[in-house]
Image (cartoon, rainbow, N blue to C red):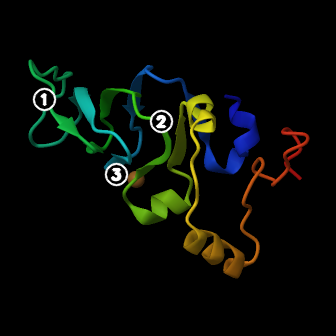
Amino acid sequence: MDPTIYGTGVNPQVIPFGAVVEISFNNHDTRAHPFHLHGHNFQVVARYGNGPNFPDSPYYPAVSMRRDVILVHPQGAATIRYIADRPGVNLFHCHVEWHVEAGMTATFIRAPDLLQKQKIYTLNSHKQVCKAFGNTLMKGNAGGKSKNWYDLS
Ligand SMILES: [Cu+2]
């Protein structure tokens, strides 16, 4: 449940099972950012900015639309919400690829305590791909260590 062991490079966010996750974006950039959440659909709770379909003041819909991508308008803001009721590891990122490369991404680790209790197996064909790649870590923390979980060397 400690995000430290996943390493800082993936911007890990550990989320307990069943948590109500609310994310607010404040886009100070002059460009739009289409944020995409893997593994869940979310409700769009509020959005505002200078887009053609939205007023300058916050727009609170009577019935929230459910999406897995939201365009955060230039110099606009948005709030999304979902219930983390499915254990798993998924990316949350801007859909502009070079923005991902620039770091506009996070890894959502939902209920890792429940994931550990499950007997998840990895297909042998997948293990073979990892072995063929050479340096893919198959167990342990972000550094491949499982004795000292805080040793990321
Ligand atoms: Cu972006």
User: Left or right: where does residue 131 sit relative to residue 48?
Assistant: right
Q: Could you say which disc has been placed on residue 87 in the image? A: 2
User: Within 10 angstroms of label 2, few (less than 14), some, or many (20 or more) residues?
Assistant: some
Contact (CB < 8 A) between labels 3 and 1? no
Of labels 2 and 1, earlier in sequence is 1
Question: How much space separates mark 3 and mark 1, taking CA atoms?
Answer: 17 Å
Decide: is 50 above or below 111. Answer: below
Query: Which amino acid does the dot numbered 1 rest on?
Result: Pro
Q: Picture quarter containing residue 26? A: top left
Whole-Å distance between the Cαs marked 2 and 1?
37 Å
The secondary structure type at the circle numbered 3 is loop
Q: Which residue is mark 1?
A: 55
Q: Tell me the residue at 73%/46% (across/down).
A: 7
The disc, 2 or 3, on the residue closer to the chain's N-terminal end is 3
- For label 2, the SS is loop
Of the image marks 3 and 1, the number of the one nearer the N terminus = 3
The number of callouts visible is 3
| Circle 2: residue type | Pro
Percent across and percent down for residue 9 are: 68, 50
Are dots 2 and 3 in contact, CB under 8 Å?
no
Confirm or reject: label 3 Cβ below 8 Å from ligand 1: yes
Mark toward the viewer: 2 or 3: 2
Q: Is mark 2 within 8 Å of ligand 1?
A: no
| Residue bearing the label numbered 3 | 31
| Residue at horizontal 28 percent and vertical 38 percent from the top | 41
